[in-house]
């Protein structure tokens, strides 16, 4: 059973930093593109950043220059470094991955940024 488990969320003041991790577990024979999404209260889930298996990245305009996505294929782990956090970054952050030729989602981790 393949699972994605996020960690690293929490509460931080505006201007602070957090690093999210997403570990894939189970029997994995292929890992494709992975990404981070977020969902704020009352809003639709939105893309934050994605990374291909070869390291190509894509970011939402709202996080460009502040967030950085990376991956460690040997550890089957995805990261999101979030700097200069703003109150509008407050949301549940979800990890997404194309593993074993299908899409998996993590359970989410809460990020709260206070002003």
Image (cartoon, grey):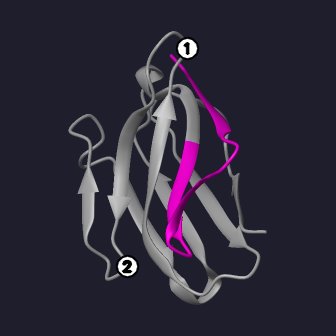
Give the residue displayed 24% in from the left and 49% down from the top. Answer: 65
Q: Position of residue 2 (x, y in %)?
A: 72, 68
Q: Dot 1, how many residues are within 10 Å of its Cα: few (below 14), some (14-19), or many (20+)?
A: few
Q: Position of residue 19 (x, y in %)?
A: 57, 54
From the viewer's perspective, is 54 left or right of 26?
A: left
Q: Quadrant of residue 63?
A: top left
Residue sitting farthest toward the top: 42
From the viewer's perspective, is 108 left or right of 96?
A: right
Q: Position of residue 46 (x, y in %)?
A: 39, 33
* Foreground residue among 97 and 101: 101
From the viewer's perspective, is 53 left or right of 36?
A: left
Q: Dot 2, how many residues are within 10 Å of its Cα: few (below 14), some (14-19), or many (20+)?
A: some
SS category of the residue bearing label 2 = loop
SS category of the residue bearing label 1 = loop
Magenta-colored stretch includes residue 108: yes
Residue assigned mark 1? 41
Q: Quadrant of residue 61?
A: top left
Give the residue displayed 46% in from the left and 50% down from the top. Answer: 36
Q: Main secondary structure of the magenta part?
A: strand
Residue assigned mark 2? 53
- Distance Cα–Cα, label 2 vs label 1: 31 Å
Q: Position of residue 54 (x, y in %)?
A: 31, 83
Residue sitting farthest toward the front: 101
From the viewer's perspective, is 102 left or right of 107?
A: left
For the record, the magenta segment spans 94-115
Magenta-colored stretch includes residue 93: no
Eyeballing the image, is 112 above or below 101? above
Give the residue displayed 52% in from the left and 64% down from the top. Answer: 102
Give the residue displayed 67% in from the left and 43% down from the top. Answer: 9
Q: Quadrant of the N terminus?
A: bottom right
Eyeballing the image, is 27 above or below 92? below
């Amino acid at each position: 059973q393949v699972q994605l488990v996020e960690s690293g969320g929490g509460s931080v003041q505006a201007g602070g930093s957090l690093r999210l991790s997403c570990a894939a577990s189970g029997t994995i024979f292929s890992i494709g593109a992975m990404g981070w999404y977020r969902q704020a209260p009352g809003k639709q889930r939105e893309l934050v950043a994605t990374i291909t298996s070869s390291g190509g990245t894509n970011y939402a305009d709202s996080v460009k220059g502040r967030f950085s996505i990376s991956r460690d294929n040997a550890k089957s782990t995805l990261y999101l470094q979030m700097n200069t956090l703003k109150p509008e970054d407050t949301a549940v952050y979800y990890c997404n991955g194309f593993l074993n030729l299908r899409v998996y989602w993590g359970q989410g981790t809460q990020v709260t940024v206070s002003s």
